[in-house]
Image (tube, rainbow, N blue to C red):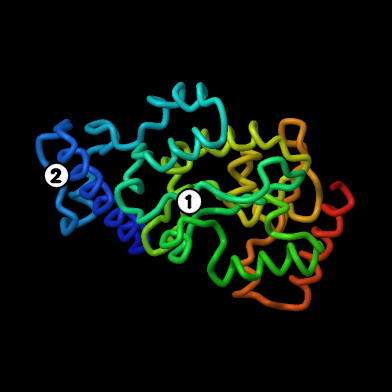
Amino acid sequence: MDNGTKNDLKDLVSETASYLEGKKKEGIAFVDSLVSPDATAGSAIKDDISQKTDLFESEKSVSEIETVSGLEELDAMVNRCRRCPLGNLRKNAVFGEGNRNTRLMFIGEAPGFEEDLQGKPFVGRAGRLLTDIITKGMNLKREDVFITNILKCRPPENRNPLPEEISCCEPYLLKQIDFIKPGVICTLGNFAVQTLLQTKDGITKIRGRFFDYRGIKLMPTFHPAYLLRNYSRKNREYVWEDVKKILAEI
């Protein structure tokens, strides 16, 4: 097991402990003892945590989400959500914001530090770049589109989302799409497009062309955070090409 994997596992153990503590405060004592966050990753998860505890309720409450009648009710449900350990670690859930009757929906990966503080999507440095793309590149207002993420809670230290976390949050996203009914979805970065299209292909391979997603045109493009790290002329040209194709459809 390499150091990166050990660190990821230790993070998961720490999140698990926080989650279980929250459940115990709610009067739900469904485990005999907590795993110590300071334990080594190997011994801490020598047994499958998911078999001992109901940490990731990916199936248990999906039926409740399906019965939601509108975005306001769904928003309230997201703010109450504790379906995975991130619900006990966040400062604010980030449901998304914008025009709920829009033709264009942007979907990113997960909230970051600033988003967690404010409860709004894309408000940090990457968010300011996305706003520039919308306002300067597309000649639209941010309020004209709807912006959200795959995950509604920030992963610790902005690490990549875990598959179990995506499974827990994806039903909320699918319901958002059902209610908004956009004509075009623009996915930002790897995780959004890989989740919706159920593909392992990376963004550099599949960006720049439309895919059909449940009758909606889906355009994958680079995440603004990636552009900030790799702000080359070529990458800017790629995004501009993607933007022009989206504009032609809305």
Which residue occupies 26% across, 38% down? 49
Name the side, left or right, on which 79 lies relative to 209.
left
Where 96 falls versus 177 (above or below)? below
User: What is the quadrant of residue 188 in the picture?
Assistant: bottom right
User: What's the mark number on residue 46?
Assistant: none
Name the side, left or right, on which 127 lies relative to 104.
left
Where 109 falls versus 170 (above or below)? below
Residue bearing mark 1? 94
Which residue occupies 23% across, 45% down? 45
The local secondary structure at tag 2 comes to loop
Q: Earlier in the sequence, mark 2 or mark 1?
A: 2
Residue type of the residue flagged with mark 1: Val
- The crowding category of the residue bearing disc 2, from other C-alpha atoms within 10 Å (few below 14, some 14 to 19, many at least 20), is some
Residue type of the residue flagged with mark 2: Leu
The local secondary structure at tag 1 comes to loop
Query: Between 245 and 37, which is closer to the camera in this rendering?
Result: 245
Which residue occupies 58% across, 42% down? 195
Query: Between 123 and 199, which is closer to the camera in this rendering?
Result: 123
User: What is the quadrant of residue 64 in the picture?
Assistant: top left
Q: Position of residue 104 (x, y in %)?
A: 74, 47
Label 2 and label 1: CA atoms lie apart by: 28 Å
Residue bearing mark 2? 34
Name the side, left or right, on which 22 lies relative to 123.
left
